[in-house]
Structures are given as C-alpha cells and as structure tokens.
C-alpha cells in the first residue's frame, strides 16, 4: 500500500487556501548516513531520524520534530502566478527500491515496501532504469476508498495522491520540495482510482517554461507518452496485468488537477478529524489541533526511541 503524507506546517490548518505558515516553505533533505542531520534554508530547519539500514526490512526514516508523516502540510503557496505544493519524495529518479511512507505505523516513517516477507523493487521497464521521475506524494491528500470518483466511477486507493516530479534534479528519499502542478493522469490500479500528478520542482531551471501539461508535451517530447507506458507496464514483471487509465489515457490539465487535490484534501481532513473510518491508517500526530489523535512531542519521541530499542533487540537475536 502506498504512503500518506508529511506535515510541513507548524500551525493547525483550517481550509485548503487558508493562511500559510513560514514552515510550509521549508525543505527536508534525507538523513544520509547518520541518525540525526539538520538542513537549513534561511533561518529554518528540520530534522530527520534514521533507524536501521537502507535496503533492509528494519529501515525507517522519521521526520522533523517527530511529526507524523500523515499530516505534513500540502497547503498551496502562491508565487509568480504559480501555485506551488509541497511534495514528499519517496523514490529518487533512476532508483528501484519501492520506498513509501508506512501509513499503518505510528508517525508514518518512510520504509521500503514488502510483499510476502521480501523487499519490493520495481523492474526496469526498457529503456528506462527504475522510476523515470522523482516519485512521491502530496501531503494532506487522501484518496478515500469509500468515495467513488464521479469521472471514472472508481473508488480511491486509500493513499495520498502520487506525484511525478519531472525536473532534472535527482532528489533524495525523505526530501520535501515545492512543485508546480502541471496536470494529472487518471490511472486505474486493479479497479482503484490512483491519480498521478505531473509536476516540476519549482527550483528547476525549466520550471519557468513549464506551466501546464501542453508545455510538457511541447518542450519534453515523448515524456508524457513514456509516463503512460511506464505506469501501464511496471507491474507486469510481477505477474500482474497492465494498468488501465481513465479518459483514454489522456492527461487532464492543471486546473483539473488542482480540483482533485482540493477534494482529496477535504477527504484527508475528515480522516484526521475521525469523521471517516481510518481503515488501519495510524493518524498519530503532534500538530493537528482538531485531531483526536494528536499527541505530545514527548509521546512521539517515545515512539521513535522504542523503534531504536527493538532494532537493538533484533540484532542480538
């Protein structure tokens, strides 16, 4: 199951286009080889904490101030006539490990997905190596499995909206970047609605030239076609059928994408306010004032410390 969402905001969120905190413009970079690292942008900082070892079942990457990954801010920021959203990078471009936010674990750390006790990797889909974009999710969105999409007649996949960053930079797992939304693809995964937002890192040199899906088609010939083919075939090596698409596999424009983001944000709000069945999703968090699952920083710290203790025990078994 795919991952949910990270919180960047340090204030409680009221509406989709409400007041934005300064922290919603911060960037988290991955804690590479050590347990604690800080990354600064101007006077702001975030912390990530790594547990276990990469490419192992015990690997976990927790986020700054031990905030649950499920409720980091996806509030849009308006700049230079563009609407920017925070994207959580789970899988760096050209890599194969299927990293995702563990929505059923407390504080929702990033981990590598498993199936039947084995770590999951996506196959190389010729002529590509691994994922062909930085792949991740938009925070504070939730594709409600109890909500049928009126356009495709499919219910949500119980995950946040996935994002494909088509910028040139190769990002890191756990990094949070601001992206310009350009369009969206309606993928249907085994009967479930699984939206794929097409976006570009706002700091990419090409970002100023790409403002909508037609700009991508014009300036990146073949890129959209490759995206459809990748999503169509990436599960075939695992013995699954090809994925299908709504709208005959055509990309919808930026305005359509923003409307989908807004509606799934409202579904997320209902989720963290306990107005929806969680379906096993762990909504523990430290920041959402109106959430019954809100916990203290000390309680969150205990969660992460308990993971450290378990890892020590596992290594001695």
Image (cartoon, rainbow, N blue to C red):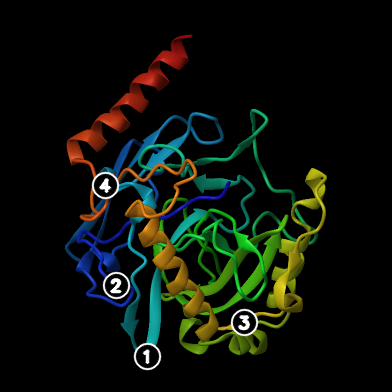
Q: Nearer the viewer, residue 276 or 29?
A: 276
Circle 1 Cα neighbour tier, 10 Å, few/some/many (<14 / 14–19 / ≥20): few
Q: Nearer the viewer, residue 102 or 229?
A: 102
Residue for badge 4 = 292
Query: Tag 3 or tag 2, which sits nearer the N-term?
Result: 2
Describe the element under mark 2 as helix, strand or loop.
loop
Mark 1 vs mark 2: in front: 2
C-alpha span from label 1 to label 4: 37 Å
Residues marked 2 and 3 touching at CB (< 8 Å): no
Describe the element under mark 3 as helix, strand or loop.
strand
Mark 4 vs mark 2: in front: 4
Mark 3 vs mark 4: in front: 4
Residue for badge 1 = 81
Residue for badge 3 = 252
The quarter holding residue 180 reads: bottom left
Residue drawn at (32%, 83%) of the image: 78
């Amino acid at each position: 199951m795919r991952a949910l969402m990270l919180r960047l905001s340090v204030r409680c969120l009221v509406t989709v286009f409400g007041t934005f905190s300064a922290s919603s413009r911060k960037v988290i970079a991955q804690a590479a080889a050590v347990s604690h690292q800080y990354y600064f942008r101007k006077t702001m900082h975030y912390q990530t904490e790594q547990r276990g070892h990469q490419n192992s079942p015990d690997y976990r990457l927790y986020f700054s101030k031990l905030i649950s990954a499920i409720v980091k801010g996806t509030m849009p920021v308006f700049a230079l006539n563009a609407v920017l959203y925070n994207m959580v990078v789970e899988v760096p471009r050209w890599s194969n490990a299927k990293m995702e936010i563990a929505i059923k674990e407390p504080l929702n750390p990033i981990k590598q997905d498993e199936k039947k006790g084995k770590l999951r990797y996506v196959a190389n889909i010729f002529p590509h190596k691994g994922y062909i974009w930085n792949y991740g999710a938009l925070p504070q969105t939730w594709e409600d499995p109890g909500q049928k999409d009126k356009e495709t007649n499919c219910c949500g996949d119980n995950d946040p909206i996935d994002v494909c960053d088509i910028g040139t930079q190769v990002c890191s797992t756990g990094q949070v970047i601001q992206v310009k939304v350009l369009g969206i693809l309606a993928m249907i995964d085994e009967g479930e609605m699984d939206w794929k937002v097409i976006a570009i890192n706002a700091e990419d040199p090409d970002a100023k030239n790409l403002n909508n899906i037609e700009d991508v088609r014009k300036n990146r010939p073949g890129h959209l076609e490759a995206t459809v083919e990748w999503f169509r075939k990436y599960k075939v090596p695992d013995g699954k059928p090809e994925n299908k698409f709504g709208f005959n596999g055509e990309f919808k424009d930026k305005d359509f994408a923003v409307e989908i983001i807004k509606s799934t944000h409202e579904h997320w709000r209902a989720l963290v306010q306990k107005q929806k069945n969680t379906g096993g999703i762990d909504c523990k968090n430290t920041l959402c004032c109106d959430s019954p699952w809100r916990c203290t920083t000390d309680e969150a710290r205990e969660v992460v410390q308990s993971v450290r203790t378990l890892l020590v025990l596992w290594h001695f078994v």
